[in-house]
Amino acid sequence: MVKITKEAALLYHSQGRPGKIEVVPTKPYRTQRDLSLAYSPGVAEPCLEIQKNGDTAYDYTDKGNLVAVISNGTAVLGLGDIGAMAGKPVMEGKGLLFKIYGGIDVFDIEVNEKDVDKFIEAVKAIAPTFGGINLEDIKAPECFEIERRLKAELDIPVMHDDQHGTAIISSAGLLNALEVAGKKIEEVKIVVNGAGAAAISCTKLYEALGATHENIVMLDSKGVITSDREGLNETKRYFATHRRDIHTLEEAVRGADVFLGLSKGNVLTQEMVRSMADHPIVFALANPVPEISYEDAMASRPDVLMSTGRSDYPNQINNVIGFPYIFRGALDTRATAINEEMKLAAVRAIASLAKQPVPDVVNNAYHVNNLTFGPDYFIPKPVDPRLITEVSMAVAKAAMDSGVARKQITDWEAYKHHLRELMGQENKLTRQLYATARRNPQRVVFAEGIHPNMLKAAVEAKAEGICQPILLGNDERIEKLAKELDLSLDGIEIVNLRHDREAERRERYAHILAEKRARQGANFQEANDKMFERNYFGMMMVETGDADAFVTGLYTKYSNTIKVAKEVIGIQPGYKHFGTMHILNSKQGTYFIADTLINRHPDTDTLIDIAKLTDKAVRFFNHEPVMAMLSYSNFGADTEGSPAKVHEAVAYMQEHYPELAIDGEMQVKFALNDRLRDEKYPFTRLNGKVVNTLVFPNLSSANATYQLLQGMSDTEVLGPIQMGLNKPIHFTDIESSVRDIVNITAIACIDAIVAKKMKEQ
């Protein structure tokens, strides 16, 4: 775990703009008309509609996506009662987590009031602002009454996350740990060390899942809570045991199956763990120091199943796995409450997710190759992108089934896509690509079958139904790697191009290539030698019809791949050059940029080919191109160098393609700011249009731009997308993720489908 110093923490919260959150407008505000709609006089209209029907506040305001994180600062983390103001950094942090994991807006509200009645009245008074309320860092036992009364008196979801968040995540972990241990929840003996808000809520939820009340022993700072102890409050009395033979933690854990710690560090010893039943489950959740360290617990006995609240050890019980998605499902159904059915639905969804194959992004985040369900992984990781869909949908369904939903969701597939789009995991364009590819899966050759990412991508592409993969590489090494990664190769063809059984095919390919390039000095022996190289062999598979598309690039330099593509596949008739394009999906819209990979210093003729190919490619993706050809100057202001080349290319394109919305040369700011461009240059062919296609004057500027935007924002990038070769040959990048490769595969499949249809016409 990275050590966090005081100086680093203070600098993080203070540097630049103080704090961690801000309010961002979601509607246009640049013109006088915009402002008149946003405020006076236009704002009066939604006000009057809400006056007629309060539910329309969800339609005209952010109420339906706005949660209040409210605290009085009486139990802040492990710091105790430090006051409302001192707890504000924590509440801001909670707001940040709501936003980045659930897409939920938050106002953090610190109420300087410890009196329960006054605190409740303050929260009730501001409740109309919000679609839900997250109570935070309020000490027990006051937190129980505060939550109970607010839930009863308000018609929006209210949840004290310190109680229920930990309960939901630990319950999911407990269900799975019991499965790994081969035990049943109704039979296990459970020891709970701690009797605060989280411990009480966890234990109640365990009972709701089937734990037997008589099998539960709870301890507080005085020891085992027994029924003969005087002065017990109602909550502790409920969990008091009638046993008289146990008083200490050491006595309580002897023979126990489960230990849940929500108390303080280093109270559980190795001897105590050794005294527990076979395959003991130890949830040591005190932070930052657990009741027993992970190292000590694992050293005590090999069969222990261990969880902590820390991110540097396996099976972290982290509330962020739950609360963003529980509120997401509650908000999206406009639920009046977060009830037990919704919490149990979240538990089961989280538990189920841990048993599913882990996506590449999660493995990469934790620098492992293959997280699989078992002793070291029975709780999903907080970065798992599937939580937003799995948990939110389960909670939403439970809200509807239990009768607390005011809005019904009928199209669950559309809701799933909405959630993915909300978090930038998916957009309409990629969804359409996959759907199109699935209609007619093509045979796609993956050049580097031994590369983990390409192997995973091939398996995933097959699972998505978008292609029939063919892997190039040593079959034994590929099978060994697949076994290590726990990947199924069923239905996936492996071609070892160096194997003797491929000799006949290598010779056949060599004769075809030698004959094709005879006038360029090629001969059979030279061509035959080349067939031992992945790119030559794979591209010849496509060239001869043995496959439909080819994906390469993880190991090979672009310059070599480009050379092979020109030799084997060739450039489409009517062009002298080919290029690549990247698609950028951002909050501002979808943008197509070229040429991002192939042509280093294009001359005028090359720029013309790039513009023509880009026009064709953008239409391929069902968009109407509005194209700006870029430079550092505008419309002839500089008559030398690259501006002159771009100027000449634009003139050619406008003369020969009068129907195309294209202009330049122009600076990026004028290309993307249509108001500024149209005011300063009203003569432009782009007047009144919004640019979606950018052609750059050279490779450096195009490549740097897409990488800059990708690195500095949440923009999703698809590409590189090949434009201008005779066959569907597509390139990846050496740093491409599994998802990047699958996206390119979908594009390659569609490219192959279109090529076949054109050939038939």
Image (cartoon, rainbow, N blue to C red):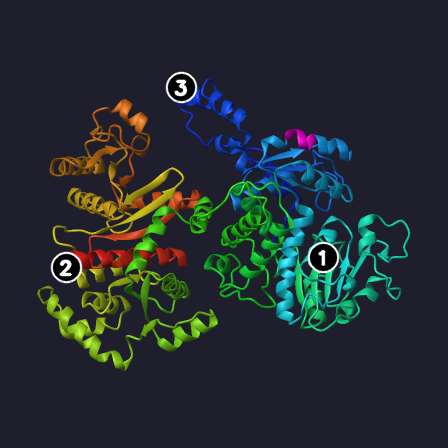
Say which amino acid is labelled 1. Pro
Which residue sits at x=17%, y=43%? Answer: 608
Mark 3 or mark 2, earlier in chain: 3
For the residues carrying marks 3 and 2, which lies nearer the camera in this image?
2
Where residue 426 sits in the image (x, y, percent)?
41, 49
Q: Marks 1 and 3: which is nearer the front? A: 3
User: Looking at the figure, which quarter contains the C terminus?
Assistant: bottom left
Disc assigned to residue 760: 2
Q: Looking at the picture, does residue 232 appear above or below residue 129?
A: below
Q: Which residue is mark 3?
A: 32
Residues at circles 1 and 3 in contact by the CB criterion of under 8 Å: no
Nearer to us in this view, 156 or 109: 156
Provide the residue span drawn in magenta. Answer: 122-126
Q: Is residue 726 visible?
A: no
Q: Label 3 neighbourhood size at 10 Å, few (<14), some (14-19), many (20+)?
A: few
- Residue 500 in magenta? no
* Separation (CA) of disc 1 from disc 3: 58 Å
Q: Is residue 681 above or below residue 704?
A: above
The image shows residue 342, relative to residue 256, as above or below, that is above
Q: Quadrant of residue 405?
A: top right
